[in-house]
Each structure stands twice: as structure tokens, then as C-alpha cells.
Amino acid sequence: MGHARVPRFWPSIAVVTCGGDSLWQRIGAWVSTSSSGRLPFVSVYAFERDRRDLVVVWPATTGSLAHVVADFGGTMSEGDAGALCAALTRLSDALWDTYVRPASAADDEDERARREGERQRFDSVVAAVRRPNVPDESGALMVSYSPVEESAHRLGRVLHRLADNGLVEAVAADLQVEIDAVTRAELGDLSGRAVQAVALDRLDVSPIQVAAADELLRADPLGARLLAAVDPAAACVAAAHWLAAAAVVAADAAGNTPGGVFVEADDIQPVSIEVPTLVVERIVEEDLSPREVVLDLLRSAVAAGEGEIVDLAGIFAERARSEELVRRLPAERRDEALAKEPVRATLLDPRRPARDLLEHLLDGIASCHLLYDEYTDGENVDLDMDADDEHGSADDAEDQHAEDEADVVAADNDRDDGLYGVAADAGRREEIADAFAASVRQQAAAAHTRLI
């Protein structure tokens, strides 16, 4: 029996000699997880036992969507159905991994070439499913080291064993839909099944998606619709640009620096400080593009989620800085202080880095609005206006009935004045919000050339 190992230089295929499926299953599992292994949100295939359907479910902007791929009929066992679903889900993961980690985001030429090769194998997926590599008479099996290609062959072997031509055609048709979804997502079109891209953390951004996010922020600089409308990585790039603009506007109002507005806003109410400050300082003070800043943060977070540290020297420097600060404390409190401020490999949640970053950026924009409101609102509106003198009592004191009616009218007018005070304050808040939005739009437009 032969053995499989990871070669130093990856060939496109290897020959594995096996006497049965058990070794192949172990090898296939290894090959199929050579991609990121971190895509829990892409299309998942399942067996619906009551109706005996093969179903695919994928995430949407809100909730999930589903589609029936095929009817298994009454002869398919649950074990076979489960094996088919697992193989389909594994192939979907490999396909979407090429979207999440495009060649353009590779750190070196070898990795770039490998990713480009993975993407080129899309054209052979359906053919591999229809005509998979199977063991020959001697038990030798051709195994590809490409996760996309080998996942397709593994799915094809499951279908080959089931020997149902109708099922093969249904699966092939659904796979073409999935491949088209990845292709459209790469082009910035998130319609149809490509909508699941909004749930993924891509390490590059589509200019089309950045432009779409930019338009949403121009319509509403607070970004209310941004969390569900576009690819989160692209949304982060646009949001970082608008955050820098909002920080400049808030700094002008507060007499502060753009990077200092978040600490000051935190004195008003708790807000995110560290991430927005870092992003603004890199864009405004270091003159980096929002794309550079966002992708740097995302790469560090994704690497941390995979057990890697991108900036080890930076972590050591941060630890040294923390230790220097705690030396000013009494000796018995130093260990406790260090434990409360651990040095992190990333500022983001490595389980959902793009979404986490986007939430920090939008919170930062809201913080800028909060501080702008604090310094712009020069009027203190009295919400408890007392208008008793204004509305008097009854004209004829001798007419008790008329006096009672006047008391009722006065009470109603008091309530109206209170409501007017609330409405006036709300109107003032709206005026300030409009002024803030207009100033941020102007600042963002002035720096628009650095958006990408």
C-alpha cells in the first residue's frame, strides 16, 4: 500500500495506491481541507428526510435562502445522502475559498501562482464531477493537490458509486449555479446566490463594491444600510474613508485632532476608541489609502484566526510598552495589571474580522457625530416649559362651568407646550445631524481620490 505526503513542490496530481476506500477517504479529507477551512457561511447541502430532498442553503443579507436540488426517491440511504451532502458542501467551500483569498491578495509569487491555478480549475469542475478519477484495476488512484479539482473528483466518485444519472445532472446544474455565483461575486454582482459573499471576509476588495458602499454612505454618512448591503471588506474600505472625513469634521468642531476625537467622545458615552483611532491616524496623518489600512488589519486578523502572527515585532514592542507602564505601579499590582491588558495579535475578532472592523468603523462615525453635536448645540432647550401665565383662567369667574372648561384647556395647552419643547429639541438635533452630514460629504468628496 502506498503513502501520501505533502510534497515540497506541489505537482498538479499524485498517484496513490490503495486497496480500498478507507485510505482514500483520509487522503481526500486532507486534500479537501487544504483551503482556508474557515468558511462556515457558504452553501451547505442537506438531506431533508421527510420529503427525501437534496437541499442547498446559503446565507442572505437577512437570514438564509434555500433551494431543492434533487429528489432522492425512496431508495437512497441516509448514509449515502449524507456522504453526497458532505462532498457538495466541501466543494462549495473550496470554490468560495478562491473568492475569499484571491491571487491579488497573495504575499509572494509562489502563492499568487497557486491561487491563480486554483481559480483556473473552475472550468474543469463540472467535467470532473461527471467523469471523476477512480481507482484502476491495480487500485491506483490519481489525486490532485488542488482543493477545487480534487473536491470535484471526490464528489464525482460519490455520484459514480450511487449510479443515478438524473442525480448527476441535477448536481451538475446546481454546481454551475454555485460557480456562476462565485464569478459574479468577484465582479461585484451580489445578486442571486452570490449574495452569500456579504457573509464572507475577503482579503481583497472589488472596486464595484467599494463604489456601491461609497454611494450608500453618501446617502447616509452614518452607514445604516452598510452592514447588509455589500461585501463587508469593500464596505470597510468605504467606511474607513468616510470615518476619516467625519473625524476631520468633528475635530474642527471640537478643536481636537482627528485621531483624538474618539477619546473625547468616550467622555460623553462609551464608544469604540482603539480601532477608529488607528484607522484615522493611518489615513489622515500617515497618508495611507483606506484600502491599505483595511486590508492590513484584515490580513492580521485572518492570520491570527489561523494561528499565525503577522507582526511579531510589533507584539513584542507592545508588550515592552505595557511592561514599562506597569513598572510605575506597586510591585504587588504589576502582574494583575498586565493580565488585564493582554497583548493581542489582532485588534479584531478573528472569527469575523471584516464584520467586526465594519462595526468599529461605523461606531467611529457615530462617535464623530456625537462629538460634533456636543460642540455645535449652543442652545439649551427647556423641555419643561411652564405656560400657565400665558393661558390664564376663565373670563367669567362667576360662571363655574366656564371656569372648569378653561382649566381643561389650560392643562391641554401645557401638555402641548411640553410636546413642542420635545419637538423643538428633536428639530434642533435633526438640523445638527444634517449639518454634520453635509460637512462630512464635503470632506469625503475633497479626499475622494484616495478612496482606493
Image: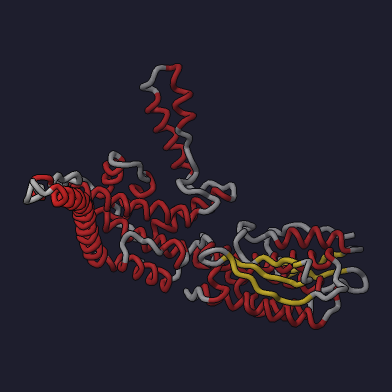
Work out whether residue 182 or residue 322 is closer to the camera in this orientation and state it. Answer: 182
Quadrant in which residue 358 is drawn: bottom left
User: Residue 432's x, y, as percent?
Assistant: 20, 56
Work out whether residue 139 or residue 332 is closer to the camera in this orientation and state it. Answer: 332
User: Residue 373's x, y, as percent?
Assistant: 22, 50
Quadrant in which residue 15 is drawn: bottom right
Q: Number of numbered discs present?
A: 0
Work out whether residue 333 or residue 57 is closer to the camera in this orientation and state it. Answer: 57
Colour mapping used in the image: secondary structure
Q: Is residue 376 visible?
A: no
Quadrant in which residue 65 is drawn: bottom right
User: Relative to 230, is 259 on the left or the right?
Assistant: left
Q: Is residue 155 visible?
A: yes
User: Relative to 213, is 23 on the left or the right?
Assistant: right
| Looking at the image, residue 150 lies above or below residue 322 | below
User: Residue 264's x, y, as percent?
Assistant: 26, 41
| Looking at the image, residue 112 lies above or below residue 259 | below
Q: Name the residue rendered at 69%, 59% in the picture.
A: 33
Q: Name the residue rendered at 74%, 58% in the picture.
A: 30
Q: Name the residue rendered at 33%, 57% in the picture.
A: 288
Quadrant location of the N terminus in the rendered image: bottom right
Quadrant location of the C terminus in the rendered image: bottom left
User: Residue 160's x, y, as percent?
Assistant: 83, 76
